């Protein structure tokens, strides 16, 4: 539904605005090799089907099925160029496209050992799967944890699924935990964040292949600025404000 809304809004834009919008979309580096190799394979097999078979039916069946699959992969690996407009001080922006599936106080016993405000974003296979840093600051550490592959929207996925934890310390000393979570379909988490590096909103934190989820753990003094089920746009939607 969210993707359909985006397409509808795009179709209503003047031609000049459409061109500007298209210029802000690129292919993520995680998908360039796969898309290129698969495109060559599709072209090669298509040529063979057209040239060596007496009937064009297999050619058209192949083109329709694998062409549609390639276009879906192209849509999955799209990577819009985004910049947050305005002052980022004390703001927490969405690290991913998707929808809000959790806003609650949760016990975080691995690092904080106390209650935190947890905000979770679920990404469907149709969403952009690049992840952005939600706050400005410095990366305190990056930990990867092997685990299961439960459906990403389930509560137990946050702790039991394979995930990558990125702790960020903001300029005022507040620790914010970002957790990239693998899902039933997503089996590869890529994290670009490096320990002791400065990080900023607008920069890519990582990438998760196929549908998955990103959790953000904030102090209880933070104020949530989103509601359950609300769509989010990575690097654009303000999800919370720090005290």
Image (cartoon, rainbow, N blue to C red):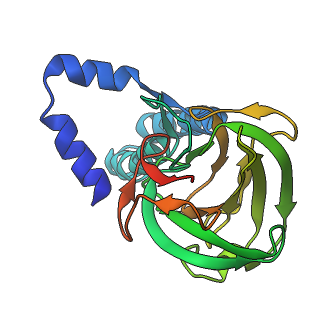
Q: Position of residue 185 (x, y in %)?
A: 60, 68
In this rendering, is residue 72 above or below 197? below
Apparent side of residue 197 relative to residue 36 in the rendered image (left or right): right
Q: Quadrant of residue 59?
A: top left
In this rendering, is residue 2 above or below 228? above
Q: Residue at x 53, y 35 (%)?
A: 88
Q: Quadrant of residue 192?
A: top right
- Residue 151 in sight from this viewpoint: no
- Residue 224 in sight from this viewpoint: yes
Q: Position of residue 8 (x, y in %)?
A: 17, 45
Apparent side of residue 241 relative to residue 22 in the rendered image (left or right): right
Q: Residue at x 87, y 37 (%)?
A: 196
Q: Nearer the viewer, residue 200 or 9?
A: 200
Q: How many marks?
A: 0
Q: Nearer the viewer, residue 67 or 238?
A: 238
Q: Nearer the viewer, residue 129 or 113?
A: 113
Q: Position of residue 4 (x, y in %)?
A: 24, 53
Q: Residue at x 80, y 74 (%)?
A: 147
Which quadrant holds the N terminus? bottom left
Q: Nearer the viewer, residue 110 or 33?
A: 110
Apparent side of residue 82 relative to residue 131 in the rendered image (left or right): left
Q: Residue at x 76, y 46 (%)?
A: 173
Q: Position of residue 129 (x, y in %)?
A: 54, 49
């Amino acid at each position: 539904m969210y993707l359909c809304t985006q397409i509808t809004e795009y179709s209503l834009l003047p031609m000049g605005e459409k061109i500007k919008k298209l210029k802000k979309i690129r292919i993520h580096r995680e998908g360039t090799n796969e898309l290129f190799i698969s495109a060559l394979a599709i072209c090669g097999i298509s040529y063979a089907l057209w040239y060596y078979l007496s009937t064009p039916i297999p050619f058209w069946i192949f083109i329709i099925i694998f062409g549609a699959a390639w276009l879906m992969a192209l849509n999955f690996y799209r990577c819009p160029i985004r910049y947050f407009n305005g002052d980022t001080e004390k703001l927490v922006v969405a690290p991913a496209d998707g929808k809000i599936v959790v806003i609650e106080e949760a016990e975080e016993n691995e690092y904080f050992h106390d209650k935190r405000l947890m905000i979770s974003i679920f990404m469907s296979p149709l969403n952009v799967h690049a992840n952005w840093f939600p706050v400005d600051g410095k990366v305190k550490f990056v930990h990867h944890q092997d685990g299961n592959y439960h459906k990403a929207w389930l509560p137990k996925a946050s702790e039991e699924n394979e995930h990558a934890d990125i702790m960020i310390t903001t300029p005022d000393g507040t620790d914010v935990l970002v957790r990239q979570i693998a899902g039933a379909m997503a089996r590869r988490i890529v994290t670009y964040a490096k320990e002791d590096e400065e990080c900023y909103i607008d920069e890519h934190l990582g990438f998760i292949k196929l549908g998955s989820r990103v959790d953000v753990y904030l102090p209880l003094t933070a104020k949530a600025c989103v509601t359950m089920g609300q769509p989010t746009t990575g690097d654009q939607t303000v999800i919370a404000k720090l005290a």
